Image: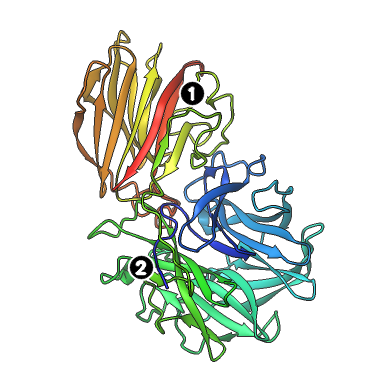
């Protein structure tokens, strides 16, 4: 038996939903304000996962103007063995102001996990985190959180279930309120239904998606309940096993539940899968804070725990409820988790660029990013400032380590002071760092210098800049546990040189950014990016020779 190391998917990969079809395992994760929307990962051994596709790639959603951390939440994968269709349910969170949480939920289907996916079927706007269940009698159900806005009622609301019409969309009959949670942690959400040995099991996330997060379970002989809570009265998976009473508490942070004895924090939001050998696993989200802090630059990642059934209840294989950084692999499996699987080396020699590139707020399109106009390069046309939530020209990949180097070579010729191109770190439109080529302030030469956004405030470091004689430079960012050093190399140089001093960028983390009032900030994650700005005529472009990420 092998040991699987967590996280199995590093970097922004939260709210994992897992299924198995034959010998193949698939996980879908949230993407928030990033496009393409809904990452889908593939594995055959539960240990090694590769991004295989995205589900929403055909203008299904418009994420421009999305506030942190709204957007596409908690996708749920399912497979209907009768129709042999893959189904994906998801929420589009459009507004979180005033804690109103306006969200529309949809479902799409496909004959192949990698698409094409159908046009969205509208399900409901009652809340968020929908999940589909395909019963053995051919009927289909949707479970979801009903968001509570009434004063004096337990927030965030009830878990509700309804039969659903998967031919035309919408629900059949009325919603049935079944529970507000199975422990005293509160914040019940992300309900998922499973059937095992004559019982319907309801798996839910609880405690808020912060340091009190956990996975809870209840069971019933009928799908609409009543659901009997797990007799322990505690989550079946968590990073913080101590008891917590927080019913009605909207706080998702719960920093008092930080566990100093664990590398893994925030374990919760689980999804269950059965192997061909009748072994059971739960995927769940987790975070890895910067040492001696409660800041999580990598956002929420995906982990795995082996489970067993005992006396009709699901629990971790080791008998505890404390999520671990390792878990036993499948019986008889001999696998090795691949080292450096998250490294990136794209020389832009192919007609398509690396699948892991994503773009905030708007879609990738050939008119602003392509590999064809300048062969062996990725060409990016400049657009809005990076403060924009409409059309920033950014190509980014998830940061997957707290210690890594990202590097590129860029050629860029500006004719206006508002035009630039380069390499950077990005959380959202208010929080980023950008080492960029552009004109000097007198517009008579090209320079390299650093522009930074922190909580919406702009800092242009004019005290540290270097002249770039041929409009071409290599730029390297060395990120080490929340601190970054910018390096550069010109065509006339053999050695890398520092640009300015090291910079504290630990605020580029879920807890360090300025999200919606009442929330902890964000829950997406840090990205590395190449990009260009043109607030002049939108006609300048940058050519990137390569893009590499090396994790230590």
Can residue 374 be seen from the camera position used here? yes
State the residue position of label 2. Answer: 325
Residue 332 or residue 230, whichever sits in front: 332
**Left or right relative to 133: residue 329:** left
Disc 1 marks which residue? 379
The residue depicted at 26 percent of the width and 69 percent of the height is 260
Residue at image x 41%, y 63%? 286
Q: Residue at x 40, y 59 (%)?
A: 337
**Where does the image place residue 299, in percent across and percent down from the top left?**
40, 54
Where is residue 304? Give x, y as percent: 45, 67
Instruction: Tell me, for residue 120, which label it has, or none.
Output: none
Horizontal and vertical percent for residue 278?
58, 78
**In terms of image quadrants, where is residue 367?**
top right
* Residue 124 seen in the figure: no
SS of the residue under disc 2: loop
- Identify whether 465 is placed above or below 56: above
Q: How far apart are marks 2 and 1 (CA)?
A: 40 Å
């Amino acid at each position: 038996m092998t040991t699987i190391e967590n996280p199995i998917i590093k970097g922004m990969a939260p709210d994992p939903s897992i299924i198995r079809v034959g010998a193949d395992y698939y996980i879908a994760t949230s993407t928030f304000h990033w496009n393409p929307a809904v990452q889908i990962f593939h594995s055959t051994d539960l240990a090694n996962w590769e991004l295989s596709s995205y589900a929403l790639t055909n203008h299904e959603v418009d994420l421009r103007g999305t506030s942190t951390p709204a957007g596409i939440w908690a996708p749920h994968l399912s497979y209907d063995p009768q129709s042999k269709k893959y189904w994906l349910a998801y929420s589009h969170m459009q507004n979180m102001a005033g804690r109103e949480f306006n969200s529309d939920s949809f479902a799409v289907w496909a004959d192949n996990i990698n698409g094409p996916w159908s046009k969205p079927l509208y399900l409901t706007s009652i809340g968020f985190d929908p999940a589909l269940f395909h019963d053995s009698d051919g009927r289909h159900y949707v479970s979801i959180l009903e968001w509570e806005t009434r004063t004096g009622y337990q927030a965030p609301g009830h878990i509700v279930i309804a039969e659903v019409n998967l031919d035309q969309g919408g629900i059949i009959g009325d919603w049935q309120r079944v529970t507000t949670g199975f422990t005293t942690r509160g914040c019940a959400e992300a309900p998922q239904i499973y059937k095992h040995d004559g019982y319907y099991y309801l798996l839910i996330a609880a405690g808020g998606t912060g340091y009190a997060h956990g996975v809870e379970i209840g069971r019933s002989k009928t799908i609409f309940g009543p659901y009997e809570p797990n007799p322990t009265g505690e989550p079946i998976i968590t990073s913080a096993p101590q008891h917590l009473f927080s019913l009605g508490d909207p706080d998702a942070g719960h920093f008092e539940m930080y566990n100093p004895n664990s590398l893994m924090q925030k374990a919760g939001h689980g999804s269950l899968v059965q192997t061909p050998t009748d072994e059971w696993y739960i995927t769940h989200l987790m975070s890895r804070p910067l040492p001696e802090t409660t800041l999580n630059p990598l956002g929420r990642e995906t982990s795995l725990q082996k489970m067993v059934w005992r006396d009709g209840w699901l629990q971790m294989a080791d008998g505890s409820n404390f999520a671990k950084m390792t878990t036993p692999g499948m019986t008889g499996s001999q696998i090795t988790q691949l080292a450096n699987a998250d490294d990136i080396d794209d020389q832009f020699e192919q007609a398509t660029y690396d699948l892991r590139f994503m773009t905030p707020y708007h879609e990738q399109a050939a008119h602003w990013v392509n590999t064809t106009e300048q062969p062996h390069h990725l060409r990016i046309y400049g657009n809005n400032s990076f403060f924009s939530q409409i059309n920033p020209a950014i190509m980014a990949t998830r940061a997957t380590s707290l210690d890594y180097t990202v590097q590129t070579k860029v050629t860029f010729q500006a004719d206006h002071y508002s035009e630039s191109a380069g390499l950077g770190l990005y959380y959202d439109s208010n929080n980023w760092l950008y080492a960029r080529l552009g004109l000097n302030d007198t517009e008579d030469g090209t320079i390299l210098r650093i522009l930074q956004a922190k909580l919406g405030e702009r800092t242009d470091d004019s005290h540290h800049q270097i002249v770039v004689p041929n409009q071409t430079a290599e730029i390297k960012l060395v990120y080490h546990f929340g601190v970054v050093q910018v390096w550069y190399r010109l065509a006339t140089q053999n050695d890398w040189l520092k640009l300015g001093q090291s910079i504290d960028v630990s605020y580029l983390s879920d807890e360090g950014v300025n999200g919606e009032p009442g929330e902890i900030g964000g829950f997406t994650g840090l990205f590395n990016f190449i990009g260009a700005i043109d607030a002049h005529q939108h006609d300048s472009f940058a050519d990137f020779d390569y893009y590499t990420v090396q994790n230590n």
